[in-house]
């Protein structure tokens, strides 16, 4: 089970990111728990400057823009 | 999706770029005569109201969209060199003044989305970038962007685009510098001031040319995919104005002689929240009907640079007084630009 957090103040790109991660996880049959982090203080505590950011198992792996499908597949297969 | 077509530009990035430039150029050269032929073939009088409107629409839409696709692609590649983290590292420890100029210029090439404004703002301050310098970046980034510049270039020509670029940068530099001099750090929200300092270190994995091409495609999908309806709507309204509003109608309302036109344009512009894509085609049509360039530029800048929703977002990190100062300083800059233009031209 992967713990994934998506950091973002609720813009369209953040929603797209969550949808895409869910889609890829389902396609690969990997169990994920996705948490939306929308509070600005919590977002900043991860040291991310551009949203959406993605945190996988406590580590920031992406910041700024919707991540590519390849990237997501890579995170989930680790 | 077809993976072969996706992988090919990645594997042969240089060949792809050369081919892309040739295809784009070929399209650009054939589109203009083509759209003229389309208008000529339409069963309407060229000199009629409808003819004038259609001509504007069919002539400008393909031109602007093609220019935009090309430039957004190139900027997507350029953006991949300037992540916010790198920009921040470049700004830390510079003398104010120099740093304001750099921040405003970097604001043009660093990818920026208004939903990231707050995290960026805090991230800069946390690393020790001065408040005024941060503002220079934050004013320039949304106001001087590739979409606005492309539309200005496509609809008004190079001179106006260049003027917009240099004036937009000047406003960002001066406004940021003034805010820095006012020593308003106390008017940040308390939790922002108490944030732990972070270092401006960044680890940037190198990117191959193929990945940058990918970034170019992505920004075309994201930006052009988002703004084309605004452009179509803007050009359609502009076309309506071109065809139906009488010549020199705007001269009385937005002309040079009306001293109150510039402030009025700013006041109307601030609460409007649309992007450059929608507003520029309309503005071009107004200009053709006798509105003064300074007034029109002031309107455009206030629509793009100062918006109520943005201030609501900034309220999370700034106290009212600092927001008011920010809006006041930028609005003053825009007013000066408007008057100077009306006076000089």
Image (tube, coloured by chain):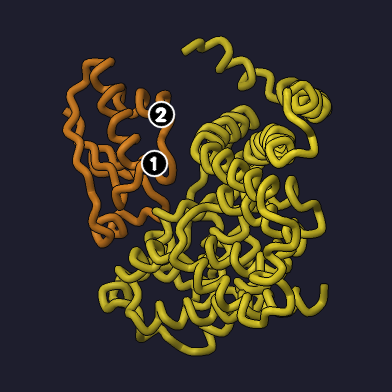
Q: Position of residue B170 (x, y in %)?
A: 68, 73
Please identify the quarter of the rendering in which residue B4 is found: top right
Residue furthest bottom in the image: B182
Where disc 2 sits, the SS reads helix
Q: Residues within 10 Å of mark 2 (few under 14, many from 20)?
A: few
In this rendering, would B28 be left or right of A64?
A: right
Where disc 1 sits, the SS reads strand
Q: Could you tell me if the residues under marks 2 and 1 are in contact, i.e. CB atoms within 8 Å?
A: yes
- Which is more N-terminal, label 1 or label 2? 1
Q: Is residue B18 visible?
A: no
Q: Which residue is mark 2?
A: A71
Chain ID for yellow? B
Say which residue appears at 52% left-offset and 66% top-offset.
Answer: B269
Q: On residue A62, which mark appears?
A: 1
B27 to B287, vertically: above or below = above
Chain A appears in which tint?
orange
In this rendering, would A12 be left or right of A58?
A: right
Q: Position of residue A21 (x, y in %)?
A: 30, 29
Q: Is residue B76 visible?
A: yes
B207 to B197, vertically: above or below = above
Say which residue appears at 68% left-offset and 64% top-offset.
Answer: B250
Which is more toward the observer, B296 or B248?
A: B248
Q: Position of residue B5 (x, y in %)?
A: 58, 13
Q: Specify the quadrant that holds the C terminus of chain B.
A: bottom right
> Badge 2 sits on which subunit?
A
Which is more toward the observer, B244 or A45?
A: B244
B42 to B178, vertically: above or below = above
């Amino acid at each position: 089970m992967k713990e994934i957090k998506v950091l973002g103040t609720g813009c369209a790109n953040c929603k797209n990111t969550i949808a895409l991660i869910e889609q890829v996880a389902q396609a690969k049959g990997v169990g994920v728990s996705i948490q939306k982090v929308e509070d600005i203080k919590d977002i900043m505590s991860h040291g991310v400057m551009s949203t959406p950011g993605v945190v996988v198992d406590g580590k920031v792996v992406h910041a700024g823009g919707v991540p590519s499908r390849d990237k997501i597949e890579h995170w989930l297969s680790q | 999706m077809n993976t072969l077509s996706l992988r090919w530009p990645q594997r042969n990035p240089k060949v792809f770029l050369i081919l892309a430039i040739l295809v784009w150029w070929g399209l650009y050269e054939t589109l203009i005569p083509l759209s003229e032929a389309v208008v000529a073939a339409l069963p309407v009088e060229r000199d009629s109201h409808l003819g004038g409107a259609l001509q504007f629409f069919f002539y400008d839409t393909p031109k602007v969209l093609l220019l935009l696709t090309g430039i957004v692609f190139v900027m997507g590649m350029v953006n991949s060199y300037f992540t916010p983290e790198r920009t921040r590292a470049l700004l830390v420890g510079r003398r104010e003044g120099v740093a304001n100029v750099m921040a405003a210029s970097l604001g043009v090439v660093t990818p920026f989305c208004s939903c990231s404004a707050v995290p960026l703002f805090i991230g800069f301050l946390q690393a020790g970038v001065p408040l005024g310098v941060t503002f220079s970046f934050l004013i320039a980034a949304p106001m001087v962007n590739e979409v606005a510049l492309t539309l200005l270039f496509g609809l008004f020509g190079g001179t106006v685009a260049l003027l917009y670029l240099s004036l937009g940068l000047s406003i960002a530099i001066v406004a940021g510098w003034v805010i820095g001099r006012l020593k308003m750090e106390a008017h940040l929200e308390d939790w922002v001031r108490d944030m732990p300092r972070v270092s401006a270190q960044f680890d940037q994995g190198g990117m191959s040319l193929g990945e940058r091409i990918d970034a170019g495609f992505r920004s075309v999908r994201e930006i052009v995919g988002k703004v084309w309806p605004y452009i179509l709507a803007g050009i359609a309204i502009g076309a309506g104005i071109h065809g139906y509003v009488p010549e020199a109608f705007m001269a009385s309302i937005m002309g040079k002689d009306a001293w109150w036109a510039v402030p009025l344009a700013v006041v109307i512009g601030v609460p409007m929240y649309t992007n450059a894509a929608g507003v520029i085609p309309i503005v071009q049509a107004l200009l053709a009907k006798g509105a003064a360039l300074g007034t029109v530029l002031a309107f455009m800048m206030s629509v793009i640079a100062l918006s109520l929703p943005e201030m609501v977002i900034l309220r999370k990190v700034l106290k009212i007084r600092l927001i008011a100062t920010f809006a006041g300083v930028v609005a003053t800059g825009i007013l000066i630009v408007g008057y100077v233009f009306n006076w000089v031209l």
